Amino acid sequence: MAMKEIARDVVGRAANLALRMPISWVNILAGPPIVVDGRTLDGRTQWFLQLLARSGRPAMHQLTVREARAELDAVLPLLGGRPAPVGEIVDRTIAGPADRMRIRLYRPAGTVARLLPAILYFHGGGWVLGSLEAYDLVCRYLCARSGCAVVAVDYRLAPEHKFPAAVDDAVAAFRWLAAEATTIGIDPARVVVAGDSAGATLATVISRLLREDPRPPCLQWLIYPATDLSGSTPSYASCGEGFLLTRADIEWVRGHYLNGPGEVDDPRASPLKAPDLEGLPPALVYTAGFDPLRDEGQAYAARLSAAGVKTIHREFDSLIHGFAGMRGVLQAAARAMDDMVAGLRHELAQLGR
C-alpha cells in the first residue's frame, strides 16, 4: 500500500474514533489529563494523539519529503469536516518571481456586484509541505464563515526552492492582488494577509516588507506563527515531544528550508528578530497551548504591541499545533476556528468605521 493510502487509513481510523466516541469514554480511555506549563490538554485531542501513537505511524522527520507531502495531502481532508458551501471557486495562475504561480480564489455565496474584503492565505507545512488541495477545506470554511473572498497561494516549496523563494512569492502574490483587486471583485483597501504556521510567518514578513507600499495589507491574521527559527524558547522543550509537531520535525523542515544556519537570524525567516516592527497593520495573533511555537508567537505579539501596532493575542491553551485543519474531528478546534473568524469579522468591521 502506498504511503498516501497508509496515512489516510491510519489517521482516518484515529479521527473517526476521536470524534465519534462519547466524551465520557474518551476521558476513561485517555487516562489522567495531561498538564504542561499549567495548561490542560483537551481530552479528545489527548485521545486522538494516543491513537496516532499506537498506530505506529512514522513521524514527519522520519519520512522523505515526497512521503511527507503525500501524507499531508491525504490527511488534512480527513480532518477538516464537511466542505463549507461557497459561491465560486476559480483556479488560475499569475506571474511569480520565477515562473507562473497557482492561486485559488474562493468567493462566498450571494455576493454578486460588490467589492469584498479578501483574505490572502498562505498555507502551513514548514515551507516544505502543503498545497492548495490539502488546504481546500480550510479555505472554504474561512470564506463561508468570514464573508470574505479567499485567495490561496501555491507558493514555491523547499528543498527545491530554498529561502527566500517562498517570501518572494508571497510578496508577488500580494502585489498582484493589490493591483488586480477591483477586476476580481475585491476591495484593495481591505486585503488581510493570513496563514497558519509557516504561512503565518510569510504573512507577517510581507506585512513588514510592504508597509511602504501604496496599498499595504489592512490586517495580519496569524495562526500559531513561527517567528524564531533558533528554537530557543521554553515551549520547544516542554511541548517538543508528544503533541504531533515535534522539535525534531521543526529541525527537519528548517534544514530543508534554509540554505544554512546563518539565515536563522534573517528577519524574513525569523520575524521576531526584525529590529523594527513599527508601522505594521493591526494583528490578530493566535497560539496553541501545547505547541513548540507557543512562546515565540506570544513573544512576537508582545513585540508588535510594544512597537505601537494594535495587537490582539489569544492562546487556545488546550490545543495543539495544526488545529486549524482539525475542525472536523476535534470540537475544541472547531470552536477555536469559530472564535478566530469572529475576531476577524470584528476587526474588519472596526476598520470600516
Image (cartoon, rainbow, N blue to C red):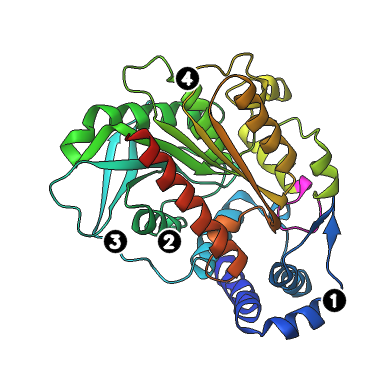
Crowdedness of circle 1 by 10 Å Cα count: few (<14), some, many (20+)?
A: few
Residue 244 part of the magenta segment = yes
Query: Which badge, 4 or 1, is on the more N-terminal residue?
Result: 1
Give the x, y percent position of residue 293: 71, 42
Regarding mark 2 in the picture, which secondary structure is present there?
helix
Crowdedness of circle 4 by 10 Å Cα count: few (<14), some, many (20+)?
A: some
Query: Which badge, 3 or 4, is on the more N-terminal residue?
Result: 3
Judge depth for marks 2 and 1 and give the one in front.
Answer: 1
Q: Quadrant of the C terminus?
A: top left
Instruction: Give yes or no for contact between labels 2 and 1 (Cβ–Cβ under 8 Å).
Output: no
Q: Residue flagged by tag 4: what amino acid is it?
A: Leu
| The disc label shown at residue 86, or none | 3
Q: CA distance from mark 4 to mark 2?
A: 29 Å
Please provide the residue range marked out in magenta. Answer: 241-248
| The disc label shown at residue 31, or none | 1
Query: Which badge, 4 or 2, is on the more N-terminal residue?
Result: 2
What residue is shown with label 2?
137
Q: CA distance from mark 2 to mark 1?
A: 32 Å
Looking at the image, residue 188 sits to the left or right of residue 224; the answer is left
Q: CA distance from mark 3 to mark 4?
A: 32 Å
* Residue at 42% in and 31% down: 169
Inspect this view and state whether residue 259 appears.
Answer: no
Placement of 267 over or under 196, stated as above or below: above
